[in-house]
Image (cartoon, rainbow, N blue to C red):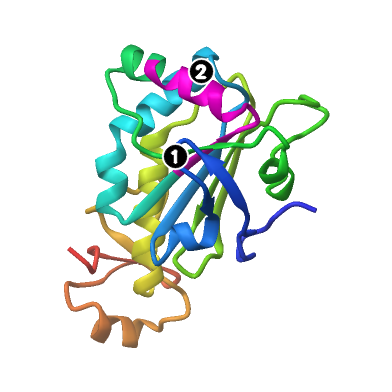
Amino acid sequence: MSLRLGDVAPDFEANTTQGPIRFHEWLGDSWGMLFSHPADFTPVCTTELGKTALLQGEFAKRNVKVIAVSVDDLESHNRWIPDINEVTGSDVNFPIIADEGRKVAQLYDMIHPNASEKSTVRSVFIIGPDKKIKLTLTYPASTGRNFNELLRVVDSLQLTANHSVATPADWKDGEDVIVVPAVSTEDAEKKFTKGLRIVKPYLRYTPQPNK
């Protein structure tokens, strides 16, 4: 059965390129991003892990721990990492799970038989400090992910978790946000002291409250 938003992310034990972990314990009080790739030594995956490594500082600033998973074994991962570092000019400093038994892939429904019976699809799970799933994305094996978009999503999730706002289409950190419908206009005028721009009774913008 597939996982849904708000579900507790399944816990597991696994070997990784940075040693054995128990997933929930490893996450601690951080946010987490768990993402799968179909196989080691493949071109798109090489660019994806390299991009993640290049953005590691951005994820760390947001208190997001990043972890990748592949159905290849630990020896294969360790042989592949130098290639990623060389090709992308990065340093892969996050763990990659060795999931040759497909335990994690099955827990997170990462194998879609009609696409491939053996390889994982490109799944992404953003997990909150409460260990609940906040976002899921699934890409086909042929399409590399936009990791800047994943950072944008994290910015939105962290902002909206702490304020009574939502983020509009194409929103970027620092831009105006939307007051959620549950807050009346009268209360919004008191709550959001930077101002309120009313486009429709149900569409009210305010400057980002945590800036």
Q: Answer with left or right where residue 207 lies relative to residue 8.
A: left
Segment tinted magenta in the rendering: 67-82
Residue at position x 54%, y 56% in the image: 23
Q: Residues within 10 Å of mark 2 (few under 14, many from 20)?
A: some
Q: Which residue is mark 2?
A: 44
Q: Answer with left or right where residue 181 lies relative to residue 192.
A: right
Residue at position x 76%, y 26% in the image: 118
The answer to whether residue 200 shows anywhere in this view is no
Residue 197's place in the image compared with 86, above or below, is below
Residue at position x 38%, y 56% in the image: 156
Residue 195's place in the image compared with 60, above or below, is below
Q: Which mark is residue 207?
A: none
Q: x%, y% of residue 90?
A: 29, 24
Which numbered disc flags the more N-terminal residue, 2 or 1?
Answer: 2
**Does the segment drawn in magenta span residue 76?**
yes
Q: Which residue is mark 1?
A: 95
Q: Nearer the viewer, residue 210 or 165?
A: 210
- The amino acid on which the numbered mark 1 sits, given as a three-letter code, is Pro
Residue at position x 51%, y 22% in the image: 45
Residue 169's place in the image compared with 72, above or below, is below
Separation of marks 2 and 1 at Cα, in angstroms: 18 Å
Query: Please, what secondary structure does the residue beneath circle 2 have?
Result: helix
Residue 76: name its quadrant.
top right
- The amino acid on which the numbered mark 2 sits, given as a three-letter code, is Val
Q: x%, y% of residue 111?
A: 74, 35
